[in-house]
Image (spheres, rainbow, N blue to C red):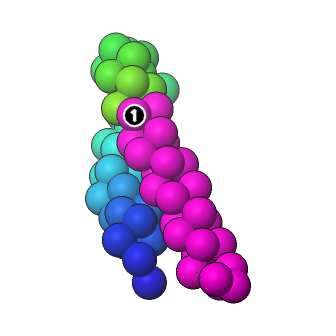
Amino acid sequence: MTWSDVLTVAAAVGTGVPRNNRLEQYGNSSQGVEHWPTYRREWTRANHVRTTAGIGAALLLTLAVMPT
């Protein structure tokens, strides 16, 4: 397991789950509508981190198994 694997999982669990739970608490209320732009901005940022970490992990794995 590489650092980027750990970062990918940590970003998903540490950022996505709490945000999803908070948004779910608001439901269809006006607070949910007001919170949506913040949720979307934070989720998008975390998703970019997860994606970059996943690509990094795939690249490192590929380099590790290539013959020298």
Q: Is residue 41 above or below residue 68?
A: above
The reply to whether residue 13 is visible in this rendering is: no
Measured from the top left, where is residue 41 in percent x and y?
39, 24
Measured from the top left, where is residue 9 in percent x and y?
42, 67
Q: Viewed as shown, does residue 23 lie left or right of 28?
A: left
* In-front residue for pair 42/5: 5
User: Does residue 56 show up magenta in the picture?
Assistant: yes
Mark 1 secondary-structure assignment = helix
Measured from the top left, where is residue 12 in percent x and y?
43, 58
What range is drawn magenta here? 44-68
Q: Viewed as shown, does residue 9 lie left or right of 31?
A: right
User: Does residue 59 show up magenta in the picture?
Assistant: yes
Alpha-carbon neighbours of circle 1 within 10 Å: few (<14), some, or many (≥20)? few
Q: Is residue 48 above or below residue 51?
A: above
Quarter assignment of residue 65: bottom right
Image quadrant in which the C terminus is located:
bottom right
The reply to whether residue 34 is visible in this rendering is: yes
Residue identified by numbered label 1: 45
Identity of the residue drawn at 59% across and 63% down: 59
Q: Residue furthest front?
A: 68
Image quadrant in which the N terminus is located:
bottom left
* In-front residue for pair 16/58: 58
Identity of the residue drawn at 54% across and 49% down: 51
Measured from the top left, where is residue 30 in percent x and y?
37, 16
Q: Viewed as shown, does residue 16 lie left or right of 65?
A: left
Amino acid type of disc 1? Answer: Arg
Q: Is residue 19 above or below residue 33?
A: below
* In-front residue for pair 3/9: 3
Identity of the residue drawn at 36% across and 63% down: 7
User: What is the magenta segment's predominant secondary structure?
Assistant: helix
